[in-house]
Image (spheres, rainbow, N blue to C red):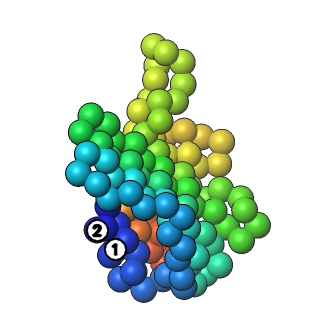
């Protein structure tokens, strides 16, 4: 979990961040962070790891609170067609490979580069 915090600290687009919750124990690791970026957007990070589960959500929104992207692995959709790892873009849900903080920060940088 602390590696997520290190990545946030070293990402040059970060204005500041607030750790909302941190559990760093042998059987359970959980981090919840709110990250303010220099472009005025906000990234909310939740990452939970235990011996049996890994759950994540990276929610990125603009200044007005409108979703830009959200990556998570909470099952989405009907039972037969459930999508585990996915990205929300506008009203679309797109299946993706599992993503880490590195991938999210890379996508944020690319999004900013294309603006």
SS for tag 1? helix
* Residue 37 pos. (x, y %): 56, 78
Q: Which of 19 and 82 is in front in this view?
A: 19
- Considering only vertical position in the picture, is 32 above or below 79? below
**Does dot 2 land on a helix, a strand or a loop?**
helix
Q: Cβ–Cβ below 8 Å for labels 2 and 1? A: yes
Task: Please state which of residues 107 and 3 is positioned toward the viewer in this rendering.
Answer: 3
| Quarter of the figure with residue 41 | bottom right
x, y percentage for residue 87? 49, 46
Seen from this angle, which residue lies furthest top?
80
Q: Kindly tell me whether residue 88 is visible in this rendering.
A: yes
Q: Residue furthest front?
A: 25
In the rendered view of the protein, which quadrant contains the N terminus?
A: bottom left
| Residue at 54% in and 73% down | 18
Residue shown at 38%/57% (left/top)?
23
Q: How far apart are marks 2 and 1 (CA)?
A: 6 Å
Q: Dot 2, crowdedness within 10 Å: few (<14), some or many (≥20)?
A: few
Q: How crowded is mark 1: few (under 14 residues within 10 Å), some or many (20 or more)?
A: few
Tell me the tag on residue 3.
Answer: 2
Residue at figure coordinates x 65%, y 48% from the top left: 90
The image quadrant of residue 101 is bottom left
Q: Looking at the rendered structure, which numbered label has been put on residue 7?
A: 1
């Amino acid at each position: 979990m602390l590696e997520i915090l290190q990545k946030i600290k070293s990402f040059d687009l970060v204005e500041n961040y607030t750790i909302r919750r941190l559990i760093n124990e042998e059987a359970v690791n959980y981090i919840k962070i709110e990250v303010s970026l220099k472009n005025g957007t906000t990234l909310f990070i939740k990452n939970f790891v235990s011996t049996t589960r890994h759950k994540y959500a990276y929610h990125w929104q603009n200044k007005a609170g409108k979703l830009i992207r959200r990556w998570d692995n909470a099952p989405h959709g009907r039972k037969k067609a459930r999508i585990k790892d996915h990205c929300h873009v506008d009203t679309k849900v797109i299946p993706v490979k599992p993503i880490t903080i590195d991938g999210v920060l890379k996508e944020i940088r690319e999004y900013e580069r294309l603006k």
